[in-house]
Image (cartoon, grey):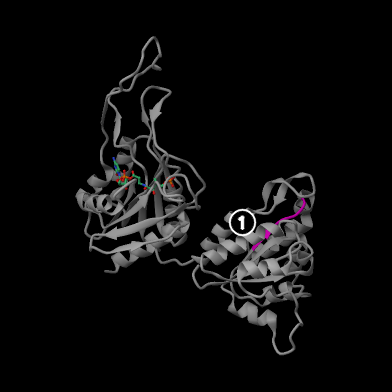
Protein backbone atom coordinates (compact mmCIF):
# COMPACT_ATOMS: atom_id res chain seq x y z
CA UNK A 1 0.00 0.00 0.00
CA UNK A 2 3.09 2.20 0.39
CA UNK A 3 2.82 5.21 -1.92
CA UNK A 4 -0.54 4.21 -3.40
CA UNK A 5 -2.96 7.06 -3.87
CA UNK A 6 -6.34 6.08 -2.46
CA UNK A 7 -9.35 8.27 -2.83
CA UNK A 8 -12.00 7.77 -0.15
CA UNK A 9 -15.45 9.06 -1.09
CA UNK A 10 -17.63 9.65 1.95
CA UNK A 11 -21.38 10.02 1.46
CA UNK A 12 -24.15 10.85 3.92
CA UNK A 13 -24.76 7.65 5.86
CA UNK A 14 -24.42 7.43 9.62
CA UNK A 15 -21.59 4.90 9.13
CA UNK A 16 -19.43 7.92 8.11
CA UNK A 17 -17.91 7.92 11.56
CA UNK A 18 -16.52 4.40 11.00
CA UNK A 19 -14.75 5.60 7.86
CA UNK A 20 -12.49 7.71 10.08
CA UNK A 21 -10.95 4.42 11.22
CA UNK A 22 -10.57 3.20 7.63
CA UNK A 23 -8.81 6.41 6.57
CA UNK A 24 -6.50 6.17 9.55
CA UNK A 25 -5.65 2.51 8.81
CA UNK A 26 -4.92 3.25 5.14
CA UNK A 27 -2.64 6.14 6.06
CA UNK A 28 -0.82 4.07 8.70
CA UNK A 29 -0.03 1.52 5.99
CA UNK A 30 1.66 4.18 3.89
CA UNK A 31 -1.16 5.06 1.48
CA UNK A 32 -1.56 8.66 0.33
CA UNK A 33 -5.23 9.13 1.23
CA UNK A 34 -7.45 11.87 -0.23
CA UNK A 35 -10.96 12.23 1.09
CA UNK A 36 -13.86 13.62 -0.95
CA UNK A 37 -17.05 14.35 1.00
CA UNK A 38 -20.58 14.98 -0.23
CA UNK A 39 -22.66 17.75 1.33
CA UNK A 40 -24.71 15.17 3.28
CA UNK A 41 -21.57 13.54 4.69
CA UNK A 42 -20.44 16.91 6.04
CA UNK A 43 -23.64 17.06 8.14
CA UNK A 44 -22.39 13.97 9.99
CA UNK A 45 -18.59 14.30 10.25
CA UNK A 46 -16.61 17.49 9.64
CA UNK A 47 -14.03 17.68 6.84
CA UNK A 48 -11.58 18.75 9.53
CA UNK A 49 -11.66 15.26 11.08
CA UNK A 50 -10.77 13.62 7.76
CA UNK A 51 -8.12 16.26 7.07
CA UNK A 52 -6.38 15.43 10.35
CA UNK A 53 -6.66 11.66 9.80
CA UNK A 54 -5.58 11.63 6.15
CA UNK A 55 -2.94 14.38 6.40
CA UNK A 56 -4.33 15.86 3.17
CA UNK A 57 -6.88 18.58 2.41
CA UNK A 58 -10.44 17.29 2.07
CA UNK A 59 -12.24 18.04 -1.21
CA UNK A 60 -15.89 19.00 -1.08
CA UNK A 61 -16.57 21.41 -3.95
CA UNK A 62 -16.63 21.02 -7.71
CA UNK A 63 -16.15 24.71 -8.43
CA UNK A 64 -14.00 26.14 -5.64
CA UNK A 65 -10.95 27.09 -7.72
CA UNK A 66 -11.33 28.47 -11.26
CA UNK A 67 -7.70 27.53 -12.05
CA UNK A 68 -8.03 23.80 -11.38
CA UNK A 69 -10.34 20.95 -12.36
CA UNK A 70 -10.47 18.99 -9.08
CA UNK A 71 -12.50 16.02 -10.30
CA UNK A 72 -10.07 15.31 -13.15
CA UNK A 73 -6.94 15.91 -11.05
CA UNK A 74 -8.14 13.56 -8.31
CA UNK A 75 -9.44 10.92 -10.74
CA UNK A 76 -6.21 10.84 -12.76
CA UNK A 77 -3.93 10.31 -9.76
CA UNK A 78 -5.98 7.70 -7.89
CA UNK A 79 -4.82 4.06 -7.80
CA UNK A 80 -8.12 3.10 -6.21
CA UNK A 81 -11.39 4.73 -5.12
CA UNK A 82 -13.37 3.50 -2.10
CA UNK A 83 -16.82 4.92 -1.46
CA UNK A 84 -17.82 4.28 2.13
CA UNK A 85 -20.51 4.48 3.19
CA UNK A 86 -22.16 4.26 -0.22
CA UNK A 87 -25.74 5.47 0.14
CA UNK A 88 -28.62 4.44 -2.16
CA UNK A 89 -28.27 7.94 -3.65
CA UNK A 90 -24.61 7.66 -4.78
CA UNK A 91 -25.27 4.09 -6.00
CA UNK A 92 -28.17 5.38 -8.13
CA UNK A 93 -26.12 8.30 -9.46
CA UNK A 94 -23.21 6.03 -10.39
CA UNK A 95 -25.52 3.50 -12.05
CA UNK A 96 -27.05 6.24 -14.21
CA UNK A 97 -23.99 8.36 -14.88
CA UNK A 98 -25.32 11.36 -13.00
CA UNK A 99 -22.57 13.86 -12.18
CA UNK A 100 -23.98 16.65 -10.04
CA UNK A 101 -21.34 17.06 -7.34
CA UNK A 102 -17.60 16.48 -6.91
CA UNK A 103 -17.74 12.80 -5.90
CA UNK A 104 -20.26 11.64 -8.54
CA UNK A 105 -18.36 13.59 -11.21
CA UNK A 106 -14.94 12.25 -10.35
CA UNK A 107 -16.04 8.58 -10.23
CA UNK A 108 -17.25 9.01 -13.81
CA UNK A 109 -13.76 10.23 -14.74
CA UNK A 110 -11.91 7.42 -12.90
CA UNK A 111 -10.08 4.64 -14.75
CA UNK A 112 -8.83 2.89 -11.59
CA UNK A 113 -10.72 0.17 -9.64
CA UNK A 114 -13.70 1.43 -7.61
CA UNK A 115 -14.97 -0.21 -4.42
CA UNK A 116 -18.31 0.65 -2.82
CA UNK A 117 -19.39 -0.25 0.72
CA UNK A 118 -23.19 0.12 0.66
CA UNK A 119 -24.94 1.12 3.89
CA UNK A 120 -28.64 1.85 4.27
CA UNK A 121 -31.91 0.76 5.84
CA UNK A 122 -32.82 -2.90 5.23
CA UNK A 123 -35.92 -2.05 3.16
CA UNK A 124 -34.02 0.44 1.06
CA UNK A 125 -31.33 -2.17 0.43
CA UNK A 126 -33.82 -4.84 -0.64
CA UNK A 127 -35.72 -2.39 -2.86
CA UNK A 128 -35.58 -3.80 -6.43
CA UNK A 129 -34.46 -0.41 -7.78
CA UNK A 130 -31.41 -0.36 -5.49
CA UNK A 131 -30.66 -4.00 -6.36
CA UNK A 132 -30.93 -3.22 -10.06
CA UNK A 133 -28.53 -0.27 -9.64
CA UNK A 134 -26.06 -2.48 -7.75
CA UNK A 135 -26.27 -5.08 -10.53
CA UNK A 136 -25.54 -2.39 -13.13
CA UNK A 137 -22.47 -1.28 -11.18
CA UNK A 138 -21.30 -4.89 -10.86
CA UNK A 139 -21.53 -5.32 -14.63
CA UNK A 140 -19.56 -2.08 -15.03
CA UNK A 141 -16.77 -3.60 -12.91
CA UNK A 142 -17.42 -1.74 -9.64
CA UNK A 143 -16.51 -3.97 -6.69
CA UNK A 144 -18.86 -4.19 -3.72
CA UNK A 145 -18.11 -5.11 -0.11
CA UNK A 146 -21.04 -5.79 2.22
CA UNK A 147 -23.45 -4.73 3.44
CA UNK A 148 -23.49 -6.93 6.54
CA UNK A 149 -26.49 -7.92 8.60
CA UNK A 150 -26.97 -6.52 12.08
CA UNK A 151 -28.48 -3.64 14.04
CA UNK A 152 -29.08 -0.58 11.90
CA UNK A 153 -29.02 3.09 12.93
CA UNK A 154 -32.76 3.39 12.13
CA UNK A 155 -33.53 1.04 15.03
CA UNK A 156 -34.30 -2.04 12.93
CA UNK A 157 -32.00 -4.89 12.09
CA UNK A 158 -31.20 -6.76 8.91
CA UNK A 159 -28.95 -6.44 5.88
CA UNK A 160 -27.78 -2.89 5.34
CA UNK A 161 -24.97 -2.31 7.83
CA UNK A 162 -21.73 -1.07 6.28
CA UNK A 163 -18.91 -3.65 6.22
CA UNK A 164 -16.51 -3.08 9.13
CA UNK A 165 -13.52 -0.77 8.46
CA UNK A 166 -11.08 -3.71 8.82
CA UNK A 167 -13.02 -5.76 6.24
CA UNK A 168 -12.98 -2.80 3.82
CA UNK A 169 -9.27 -2.32 4.52
CA UNK A 170 -8.51 -5.97 3.66
CA UNK A 171 -10.61 -5.70 0.51
CA UNK A 172 -8.62 -2.63 -0.54
CA UNK A 173 -5.42 -4.65 -0.04
CA UNK A 174 -6.81 -7.47 -2.15
CA UNK A 175 -7.88 -5.22 -5.01
CA UNK A 176 -4.52 -3.41 -5.01
CA UNK A 177 -2.66 -6.72 -5.20
CA UNK A 178 -4.45 -7.85 -8.31
CA UNK A 179 -1.33 -9.05 -10.16
CA UNK A 180 -1.29 -12.51 -11.74
CA UNK A 181 2.40 -13.29 -11.32
CA UNK A 182 1.77 -16.81 -9.98
CA UNK A 183 -0.22 -17.99 -12.98
CA UNK A 184 0.76 -21.54 -13.99
CA UNK A 185 2.27 -22.38 -10.57
CA UNK A 186 0.92 -25.09 -8.28
CA UNK A 187 1.15 -24.17 -4.61
CA UNK A 188 0.46 -26.51 -1.71
CA UNK A 189 -0.28 -24.83 1.65
CA UNK A 190 -1.14 -26.16 5.11
CA UNK A 191 -3.27 -24.33 7.68
CA UNK A 192 -4.61 -24.74 11.20
CA UNK A 193 -3.56 -26.79 14.19
CA UNK A 194 -3.68 -30.57 14.16
CA UNK A 195 -5.81 -32.37 16.74
CA UNK A 196 -4.47 -35.58 18.25
CA UNK A 197 -7.23 -37.71 19.84
CA UNK A 198 -6.93 -38.92 23.43
CA UNK A 199 -10.33 -40.62 23.47
CA UNK A 200 -13.57 -40.17 21.48
CA UNK A 201 -14.26 -36.75 23.07
CA UNK A 202 -10.85 -35.23 23.84
CA UNK A 203 -7.81 -34.25 21.87
CA UNK A 204 -4.46 -32.49 22.21
CA UNK A 205 -4.55 -29.33 20.10
CA UNK A 206 -3.07 -25.85 19.82
CA UNK A 207 -4.13 -22.25 19.33
CA UNK A 208 -3.83 -22.02 15.53
CA UNK A 209 -6.88 -20.41 13.90
CA UNK A 210 -5.76 -21.21 10.36
CA UNK A 211 -5.81 -17.47 9.46
CA UNK A 212 -2.16 -17.41 8.33
CA UNK A 213 -2.52 -20.45 6.06
CA UNK A 214 -5.82 -19.21 4.62
CA UNK A 215 -4.36 -15.73 3.98
CA UNK A 216 -1.52 -17.39 2.06
CA UNK A 217 -3.92 -19.57 0.08
CA UNK A 218 -6.18 -16.63 -0.80
CA UNK A 219 -3.27 -14.35 -1.71
CA UNK A 220 -1.66 -17.04 -3.92
CA UNK A 221 -4.96 -17.83 -5.61
CA UNK A 222 -5.67 -14.15 -6.32
CA UNK A 223 -2.24 -13.95 -7.96
CA UNK A 224 -3.21 -16.73 -10.32
CA UNK A 225 -1.71 -19.82 -8.62
CA UNK A 226 -3.45 -23.18 -8.58
CA UNK A 227 -3.75 -23.71 -4.82
CA UNK A 228 -4.32 -26.82 -2.73
CA UNK A 229 -4.95 -26.14 0.94
CA UNK A 230 -4.63 -28.97 3.47
CA UNK A 231 -6.30 -27.71 6.62
CA UNK A 232 -7.78 -28.71 9.96
CA UNK A 233 -10.10 -25.68 9.96
CA UNK A 234 -12.77 -24.58 7.50
CA UNK A 235 -12.95 -20.86 6.72
CA UNK A 236 -13.99 -18.80 3.66
CA UNK A 237 -11.71 -19.24 0.66
CA UNK A 238 -11.35 -17.83 -2.82
CA UNK A 239 -13.29 -19.85 -5.37
CA UNK A 240 -11.09 -22.39 -7.14
CA UNK A 241 -8.91 -23.36 -4.15
CA UNK A 242 -8.82 -27.11 -3.61
CA UNK A 243 -9.51 -27.51 0.13
CA UNK A 244 -8.67 -30.85 1.79
CA UNK A 245 -9.77 -31.23 5.40
CA UNK A 246 -7.69 -33.30 7.81
CA UNK A 247 -7.49 -33.63 11.57
CA UNK A 248 -4.29 -35.25 12.78
CA UNK A 249 -0.59 -34.78 12.01
CA UNK A 250 -0.55 -38.23 10.38
CA UNK A 251 -3.50 -37.32 8.11
CA UNK A 252 -1.87 -34.00 7.21
CA UNK A 253 1.40 -35.84 6.51
CA UNK A 254 -0.31 -38.33 4.19
CA UNK A 255 -2.24 -35.68 2.24
CA UNK A 256 0.68 -33.27 1.94
CA UNK A 257 3.08 -35.98 0.81
CA UNK A 258 0.66 -37.34 -1.77
CA UNK A 259 0.19 -33.82 -3.24
CA UNK A 260 3.82 -32.71 -2.94
CA UNK A 261 5.36 -34.21 -6.12
CA UNK A 262 3.04 -32.17 -8.25
CA UNK A 263 3.68 -28.83 -6.43
CA UNK A 264 6.05 -26.03 -7.44
CA UNK A 265 5.92 -24.44 -4.00
CA UNK A 266 4.96 -25.83 -0.58
CA UNK A 267 4.25 -23.60 2.42
CA UNK A 268 3.76 -25.22 5.83
CA UNK A 269 1.90 -22.63 7.91
CA UNK A 270 0.07 -25.26 9.96
CA UNK A 271 0.88 -25.79 13.61
CA UNK A 272 1.52 -29.52 13.56
CA UNK A 273 1.59 -31.44 16.84
CA UNK A 274 5.02 -32.89 17.60
CA UNK A 275 3.54 -35.58 19.87
CA UNK A 276 0.34 -37.62 20.02
CA UNK A 277 -1.10 -40.01 22.62
CA UNK A 278 0.44 -43.44 22.12
CA UNK A 279 -2.78 -45.30 22.88
CA UNK A 280 -6.07 -43.67 21.87
CA UNK A 281 -8.84 -44.96 24.12
CA UNK A 282 -11.97 -46.30 22.42
CA UNK A 283 -14.18 -45.14 25.29
CA UNK A 284 -14.29 -41.80 27.12
CA UNK A 285 -11.75 -41.84 29.96
CA UNK A 286 -13.61 -41.79 33.29
CA UNK A 287 -12.55 -39.67 36.25
CA UNK A 288 -13.20 -42.56 38.72
CA UNK A 289 -11.24 -41.91 41.87
CA UNK A 290 -8.02 -41.03 40.04
CA UNK A 291 -5.90 -38.20 41.43
CA UNK A 292 -4.26 -37.61 38.09
CA UNK A 293 -3.79 -39.10 34.67
CA UNK A 294 -0.64 -39.91 32.78
CA UNK A 295 -0.91 -40.02 29.00
CA UNK A 296 2.05 -41.51 27.21
CA UNK A 297 2.96 -39.57 24.07
CA UNK A 298 4.89 -40.55 20.98
CA UNK A 299 6.33 -38.52 18.10
CA UNK A 300 4.26 -37.57 15.08
CA UNK A 301 5.87 -37.56 11.64
CA UNK A 302 7.79 -34.37 10.81
CA UNK A 303 6.06 -33.42 7.56
CA UNK A 304 8.44 -30.65 6.61
CA UNK A 305 11.49 -32.81 7.23
CA UNK A 306 10.10 -35.53 4.93
CA UNK A 307 9.39 -32.89 2.28
CA UNK A 308 12.93 -31.53 2.67
CA UNK A 309 14.42 -35.00 2.16
CA UNK A 310 12.52 -35.60 -1.07
CA UNK A 311 12.63 -32.05 -2.42
CA UNK A 312 12.96 -31.52 -6.17
CA UNK A 313 15.59 -29.01 -7.27
CA UNK A 314 13.03 -26.71 -8.85
CA UNK A 315 10.65 -26.88 -5.87
CA UNK A 316 10.48 -24.07 -3.28
CA UNK A 317 9.95 -25.34 0.26
CA UNK A 318 8.88 -22.82 2.91
CA UNK A 319 8.47 -23.53 6.61
CA UNK A 320 7.26 -21.42 9.49
CA UNK A 321 8.89 -21.21 12.90
CA UNK A 322 6.64 -20.39 15.84
CA UNK A 323 9.01 -19.30 18.59
CA UNK A 324 8.77 -17.86 22.09
CA UNK A 325 12.52 -17.18 22.45
CA UNK A 326 15.76 -17.08 20.42
CA UNK A 327 13.81 -16.43 17.21
CA UNK A 328 16.73 -16.24 14.79
CA UNK A 329 18.73 -19.10 16.26
CA UNK A 330 15.79 -21.53 16.37
CA UNK A 331 14.47 -20.55 12.94
CA UNK A 332 17.89 -20.94 11.30
CA UNK A 333 18.31 -24.36 12.88
CA UNK A 334 14.93 -25.47 11.41
CA UNK A 335 15.82 -23.99 8.02
CA UNK A 336 18.95 -26.11 7.87
CA UNK A 337 17.69 -29.32 9.51
CA UNK A 338 14.61 -29.51 7.30
CA UNK A 339 16.43 -28.53 4.08
CA UNK A 340 14.17 -25.51 3.43
CA UNK A 341 14.55 -22.67 0.95
CA UNK A 342 12.95 -20.18 3.31
CA UNK A 343 11.60 -20.02 6.83
CA UNK A 344 9.10 -17.47 8.13
CA UNK A 345 9.78 -16.87 11.81
CA UNK A 346 7.20 -15.38 14.14
CA UNK A 347 7.62 -14.64 17.82
CA UNK A 348 4.22 -15.80 19.01
CA UNK A 349 4.56 -13.92 22.32
CA UNK A 350 4.48 -10.50 20.58
CA UNK A 351 1.23 -8.54 20.63
CA UNK A 352 -0.45 -8.80 17.20
CA UNK A 353 1.73 -11.72 16.09
CA UNK A 354 1.24 -15.48 15.80
CA UNK A 355 -1.86 -17.39 16.79
CA UNK A 356 -5.40 -16.15 16.24
CA UNK A 357 -4.73 -12.53 15.27
CA UNK A 358 -5.47 -10.93 11.89
CA UNK A 359 -1.92 -9.55 11.86
CA UNK A 360 1.57 -10.95 12.22
CA UNK A 361 5.17 -9.78 12.64
CA UNK A 362 7.67 -11.97 10.80
CA UNK A 363 11.28 -12.28 9.71
CA UNK A 364 12.10 -14.34 6.63
CA UNK A 365 15.42 -16.23 6.55
CA UNK A 366 16.56 -17.98 3.40
CA UNK A 367 19.09 -20.73 2.60
CA UNK A 368 21.46 -18.20 0.99
CA UNK A 369 21.97 -16.47 4.34
CA UNK A 370 19.72 -13.47 3.66
CA UNK A 371 17.06 -12.24 6.01
CA UNK A 372 14.26 -9.65 5.88
CA UNK A 373 12.26 -8.28 8.79
CA UNK A 374 8.69 -7.07 8.38
CA UNK A 375 6.76 -4.83 10.78
CA UNK A 376 3.23 -5.57 12.01
CA UNK A 377 1.14 -6.21 8.88
CA UNK A 378 -2.15 -7.96 8.14
CA UNK A 379 -1.74 -11.69 7.48
CA UNK A 380 -2.85 -11.02 3.91
CA UNK A 381 -0.10 -8.44 3.42
CA UNK A 382 2.47 -10.76 5.03
CA UNK A 383 1.32 -13.50 2.67
CA UNK A 384 2.02 -11.29 -0.33
CA UNK A 385 5.47 -10.44 1.07
CA UNK A 386 6.22 -14.17 1.49
CA UNK A 387 5.06 -14.87 -2.07
CA UNK A 388 7.10 -11.93 -3.43
CA UNK A 389 10.18 -13.27 -1.62
CA UNK A 390 9.57 -16.81 -2.89
CA UNK A 391 9.24 -15.56 -6.46
CA UNK A 392 12.56 -13.75 -6.12
CA UNK A 393 14.14 -17.01 -4.91
CA UNK A 394 12.72 -18.79 -7.97
CA UNK A 395 14.22 -16.26 -10.35
CA UNK A 396 17.60 -16.76 -8.68
O1 LIG B 1 -3.15 -20.20 12.33
P1 LIG B 1 -2.95 -18.83 12.95
O2 LIG B 1 -3.83 -18.60 14.16
O3 LIG B 1 -3.10 -17.74 11.93
O4 LIG B 1 -1.46 -18.74 13.52
C1 LIG B 1 -0.38 -18.73 12.63
C2 LIG B 1 0.77 -19.62 13.13
C3 LIG B 1 1.32 -19.05 14.43
C4 LIG B 1 0.26 -21.05 13.36
C5 LIG B 1 1.85 -19.60 11.98
O5 LIG B 1 2.29 -18.29 11.81
C6 LIG B 1 3.05 -20.49 12.35
O6 LIG B 1 3.99 -20.07 13.00
N1 LIG B 1 2.98 -21.78 11.91
C7 LIG B 1 3.95 -22.82 12.25
C8 LIG B 1 3.64 -23.39 13.61
C9 LIG B 1 4.62 -24.49 14.02
O7 LIG B 1 4.21 -25.60 14.14
O8 LIG B 1 5.84 -24.09 14.12
P2 LIG B 1 7.10 -25.06 14.59
O9 LIG B 1 8.20 -24.10 14.83
O10 LIG B 1 6.65 -25.94 15.70
O11 LIG B 1 7.36 -25.96 13.33
C10 LIG B 1 8.30 -25.61 12.32
C11 LIG B 1 7.75 -25.99 10.96
O12 LIG B 1 7.67 -27.42 10.86
C12 LIG B 1 6.37 -25.47 10.63
O13 LIG B 1 6.35 -25.06 9.29
C13 LIG B 1 5.46 -26.68 10.85
O14 LIG B 1 4.34 -26.64 9.99
C14 LIG B 1 6.38 -27.84 10.50
N2 LIG B 1 6.10 -29.09 11.23
C15 LIG B 1 6.13 -29.13 12.58
C16 LIG B 1 5.94 -30.34 13.23
C17 LIG B 1 5.70 -31.50 12.47
N3 LIG B 1 5.46 -32.65 13.05
N4 LIG B 1 5.66 -31.42 11.14
C18 LIG B 1 5.88 -30.26 10.50
O15 LIG B 1 5.85 -30.19 9.25
Residue at x-position 77% and y-position 74%: 101
Camera-nearest residue between 283 and 155? 155
Task: Establish whether ligand 1 lies closer than 8 Å to the Cβ of label 1.
Answer: no
Instruction: Reply above or below: 354 against 65.
Output: above
Quarter of the rendering containing residue 204: top left
Element type at marker 1? Answer: helix
Residue at x-position 31% and y-position 47%: 325
The C terminus, quarter of image: bottom left
Total marks placed: 1
Q: Position of residue 220 (x, y in %)?
A: 42, 58
How dense is the environment of label 1, judged by Cα within 10 Å: few (below 14), some, or many (20 and up)? Answer: many
Q: Is residue 120 magenta?
A: yes
Q: Position of residue 35 (x, y in %)?
A: 66, 70
Q: Is residue 46 left or right of residue 365?
A: right
> Which residue bears the numbered disc 1?
165
Quarter of the rendering containing residue 340: bottom left
Camera-nearest residue between 311 and 206? 206
Residue at x-position 62% and y-position 74%: 56
Q: Is residue 88 left or right of residue 373?
A: right
Which stretch is magenta? 116-121
Task: Note whether residue 55 is visible.
Answer: yes
Task: Note whether residue 184 is visible.
Answer: no
Q: Residue furthest top?
A: 289
Q: Position of residue 135 (x, y in %)?
A: 69, 60
Instruction: Reply above or below: 287 against 77.
Output: above
Q: Is residue 119 magenta?
A: yes
Q: Position of residue 172 (x, y in %)?
A: 56, 62
Residue at x-position 40% and y-position 14%: 286
Instruction: Reply above or below: 300 against 369.
Output: above
Amino acid sequence: MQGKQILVGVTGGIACYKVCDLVSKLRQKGADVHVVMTAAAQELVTPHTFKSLSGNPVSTELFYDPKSVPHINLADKADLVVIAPATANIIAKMAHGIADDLLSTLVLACKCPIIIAPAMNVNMYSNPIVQENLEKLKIAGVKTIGPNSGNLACGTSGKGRMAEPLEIFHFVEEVLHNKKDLEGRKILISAGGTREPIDPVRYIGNRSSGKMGYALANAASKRGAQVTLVTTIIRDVEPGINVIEVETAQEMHDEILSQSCDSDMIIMAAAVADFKPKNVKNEKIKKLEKEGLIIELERTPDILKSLGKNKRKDQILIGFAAETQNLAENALEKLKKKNLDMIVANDVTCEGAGFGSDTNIVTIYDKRGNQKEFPLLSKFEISNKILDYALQMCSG
